[in-house]
Image: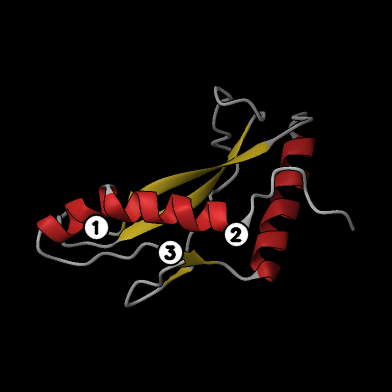
Amino acid sequence: MAKPQNCIPVQDAKDMYNNWKNSRGKDLKAKGYKDVNDFTFSLAEMQEFVAYVAEESSNAGILNPGIRIYFAATGEDSQSTAAVFLAPTTGTSSNSGNNYNVEPLNRGTNGWPPNAY
């Protein structure tokens, strides 16, 4: 299998992670607590989710669905940890609507203490 077109070099990923840590990550420390900054989903659950989105989208006549990744929090207070969820969309453009007929994926595990890239 060929490498996907949108892969980036590892060094670019490290630079992007450090950009986040040195800008937005500093704000978390200023609030006096550490938060998670990484989330792990198994390959099997990702494949299952992609297949679910593909099938449900196809059944709804959505020919080219996407998946949007949202930042979230596990609770309402400032001490809750960060989270992400993957939400199906009705297309692949940045302005595609969310497909609220297909449930998002959450329940990944987060690194604690936070894992650096």
Q: Nearer the viewer, mark 2 or mark 1?
A: 2
Disc on the earlier residue, 1 or 3? 3
Compared to residue 44, the image places residue 46 above or below, namely: above
Q: In the rendered view, does 4 fall on the left or right side of 26?
A: right
| Residue at x 70%, y 70% (from the top left corner) | 44
Q: Which residue is mark 1?
A: 75
Residue nearest the observer in this picture, 58 or 28:
28
Residue type at mark 3? Asp
| Residue at x 68%, y 68% (from the top left corner) | 43
Give the structural element (helix, strand or loop) at label 3.
loop
Give the structural element (helix, strand or loop) at label 2.
helix
Q: Position of residue 73 (x, y in %)?
A: 30, 54
Give the structural element (helix, strand or loop) at label 1.
loop
Q: Nearer the viewer, mark 3 or mark 2?
A: 2
| Residue at x 16%, y 62% (from the top left corner) | 79
Which disc is residue 38 wearing?
A: 3
Q: Nearer the viewer, mark 1 or mark 3?
A: 3
Q: Position of residue 89 (x, y in %)?
A: 60, 34
Q: CA distance from mark 2 to mark 1?
A: 33 Å
Q: CA distance from mark 1 to mark 3?
A: 17 Å
Residue type at mark 1? Gly
Disc on the earlier residue, 3 or 2? 2
Residue nearest the observer in this picture, 19 or 1:
19
Disc on the earlier residue, 2 or 1? 2
Q: Position of residue 116 (x, y in %)?
A: 41, 69
Categorize mark 3 by other alpha carbons within 10 Å: few (<14), some (14-19), many (20+).
some
Q: CA distance from mark 3 to mark 2?
A: 16 Å
Q: Which residue is mark 2?
A: 10
Compared to residue 100, the image places residue 21 above or below, namely: below
